[in-house]
Image (spheres, helix red, strand yellow):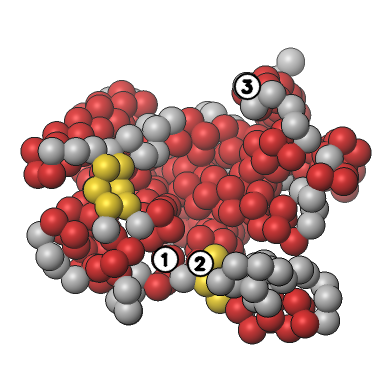
Amino acid sequence: MSAWRKSLVRPELGAICGTILVFSFFLIIARGTGMFAPQGILNWGVVSAQFAIIAVGACLLMIAGEFDLSVGSMIGFSGVVIALMSVTWGYPVWFAIIVAFAIAVAIGALNGYLVIKTGLPSFIVTLAFLYVLRGLTIYGSIATTRQTIIGGVSEVAAGDPIAWLFGGKILGFLFVWLADIGLIGKFVAGPRAGQPVIEGVPMLIVWALVLIAFAHILLTRTRFGNWIFASGGDAQAARYVGVPVNRVKILMFMFSAFCATVFATCQVMEFGSAAADRGLLKEFEAIISVVIGGALLTGGYGSVIGAALGALIFGVVQQGLFFAGVESSLFRVFLGVILLMAVILNTYIRRMITGER
């Protein structure tokens, strides 16, 4: 295969082209709106990071040949677990966070176990858990507090050693210096007068970057990464050569649940509350980001970098339409067009790889 042909079948190709087109488009129509000012970049950076966190877990799972439709419900469930344990029942926030992660990862393992042992499609198993978790979240919240929104997390999380890892900000000194030399603005009135308009980089973005780096290295630089590709490409052939396919798939379900809980914890710490309806439709947004990033729905092919670029496209389009003053409902139109183009390109790539006509 020639170098040109190899470059054409890279999974990130579509996402790279899409990223260039999206940025070029909004540089033209939203140039003077503040979208590419420091605060604007932070806005769509945070939104993109949200998509990226859950897209990373969905990416590895899809490459392994499975889907997880319970991600959105897991976000709401984990958030309510943290809020109930810390606010309603009085446990330390750090303990509530650890318990939420433990329960979520255990549910992810159960998802994987049921898929392996029953032979049912992961679409069906995780669809069932989508409803089970959402129902438990609403019931548990109402039965305990008689409401679906639980506030007061910020107060109990003050000074907590782990809560800061999800709700804090870093590099504040850098933005103070940038404000002092005039590269970013300062507040001119109110209690924060004289302070930089950007306090620091939210931990949500840090988590997204860490997960992307970890998953990319795992997938491309380790034997386990080869196992993930093999499990999704041809599970039976992988078993014949000694790949522990069942263990790989279960671990990927666990990782998907872990990423969803990272998202939920960051969201709870950001808003200071949990809501039973949080995470609605996030499972589809994660899958869309991964597909835009070049992954095949049939498994065995994809890229974490591509998924991250897909999440970036998602965030930039969503916020870019707002900055450009375009009707927000058109976001879904843009998203549908991008998704359709990505699927067509991915299908073409698959045919180039397999030689199908």
The relative height of residue 327 versus residue 80 in the rendered view (above or below) is above
CB under 8 Å between discs 3 and 2:
no
In the image, taking residue 10 as reference, residue 212 lies left or right, namely: left
Q: Give the distance between the C-alpha atoms of the residues marked 3 and 1, in whole angstroms.
A: 31 Å
CB under 8 Å between discs 2 and 1:
yes
Tell me residue 15's x, y (percent): 73, 41
Q: Closer to the N terminus: mark 3 or mark 2? A: 2
Secondary structure state at the residue bearing disc 1: helix
Tell me residue 339's x, y (percent): 66, 26
Q: Mark 3 points at which residue?
A: 329
Q: Name the residue under label 1.
A: 166
| Residue type (three-letter) at the residue carrying disc 1 | Phe
Q: Which of marks 3 and 2 is in front?
A: 3
Q: Residue at x 73, y 83 (%)?
A: 177
Q: Residue at x 35, y 57 (%)?
A: 272
Q: Mark 2 points at which residue?
A: 203
